[in-house]
Amino acid sequence: MKYVKIGQTEIAYEMCPSTKAKQIRITIVNDKVRVSFPRGTNEQKVKGFVEDKKEWILKTLEANKLSEVKNPQKNYRTGEVYLYLGRSYMLQTKVYQRAKPYLKLTDNAIWVFIPENVPESNWAILVKEELSKWYKNQAQQVYQEKLEHYSKIMGLKYNQLRIKNQATRWGSCSSKGNLNLNWRVIMAPEDVIDYLIIHELAHLKFMNHSQQFWQLVATFKPDYIKWKKWLKDNGRILVL
Ligand SMILES: [Zn+2]
């Protein structure tokens, strides 16, 4: 194993000399990085090649990590990973002696307690429902708090916050000043939520995506391009 360093992160990669390889090539499968090269290639040359590509390697590894979270067939069972404010939590389900289900967030897990009278065939539906209720609730609270904060510092008054459940839309702003925000964004990093809220608030002033509009967004979120891109690239994993 060789290592390449990016800031504080060390990335391990496997050197694979090959008689078939015509050039140096990096392949990434899940979290494994392999570098194949024609047998006899100068090792410094291979290392230099990896060094040049390190930003791309890191980006690909991060994207792979995120897509791991995206298990398209969620079964709402212990061991599955769910996102909340950009962090991964493992789902843990447990049967308990109460009449009502209960959800609890800990440092690294989301616990869903299932009443013992619920038949096993209904567990998945119940867990999904609990998760959905909890996410929407958290979204309402977190968005409201952030909205009040940004509305104040931006000097823009909104009418009402509405939590929406749309497949493809993250947020919108009506001409009456109502802000609609998708609850699924609560799964994204807080910077993404901040960006989205600032974006929708900025629409209270500019009902378009003009240069002035983006300037206003940038005033309150200078690195907004990064988070806008995050949402575009990773929006598909924000599913329940
Ligand atoms: Zn917009």
Image (cartoon, rainbow, N blue to C red):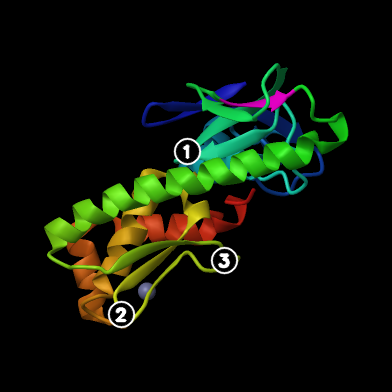
**Is 209 on the left or on the right of 240, as rendered?**
left
**Is 31 on the left or on the right of 104, as rendered?**
right
- When asked about the image quadrant of residue 41, the answer is top right
Asked if residue 198 is positioned above or below residue 84 in the image, the reply reads below
Please report the residue visible at 78 percent of the width from the left and 34 percent of the height from the top.
123
**Is 188 on the left or on the right of 160, as rendered?**
right
- Circle 2: residue type: Lys
| Neighbours of disc 2 within 10 Å: few (<14), some (14-19), many (20+) | few
* Residue 58 in view (yes/no): yes
Label 1 belongs to which residue?
Answer: 51
Q: CA distance from mark 2 to mark 3?
A: 20 Å
Q: Quadrant of the N terminus?
A: top right
Q: Is mark 2 within 8 Å of ligand 1?
A: no
For the record, the magenta segment spans 110-115
- When asked about the image quadrant of residue 160, the answer is bottom left
Residue 75 in the image: x percent, y percent?
78, 39
Q: Nearer the viewer, mark 2 or mark 3?
A: 2
* Image marks 2 and 3: residues in contact by CB distance under 8 Å: no
Q: CA distance from mark 1 to mark 3?
A: 42 Å
Asked if residue 54 is positioned above or below residue 192 in the image, the reply reads above
Label 2 belongs to which residue?
Answer: 176
Q: Nearer the viewer, mark 2 or mark 1?
A: 2
Report the front residue among 33 and 120: 120
Label 3 belongs to which residue?
Answer: 166
The majority secondary structure of the magenta stretch comes to strand
* Image marks 2 and 1: residues in contact by CB distance under 8 Å: no
Please report the residue visible at 77 percent of the width from the left and 38 percent of the height from the top.
124
- Circle 3: residue type: Gln
Marks 1 and 3, the one that precedes in the sequence: 1
Marks 2 and 1, the one that precedes in the sequence: 1
- Circle 1: residue type: Glu
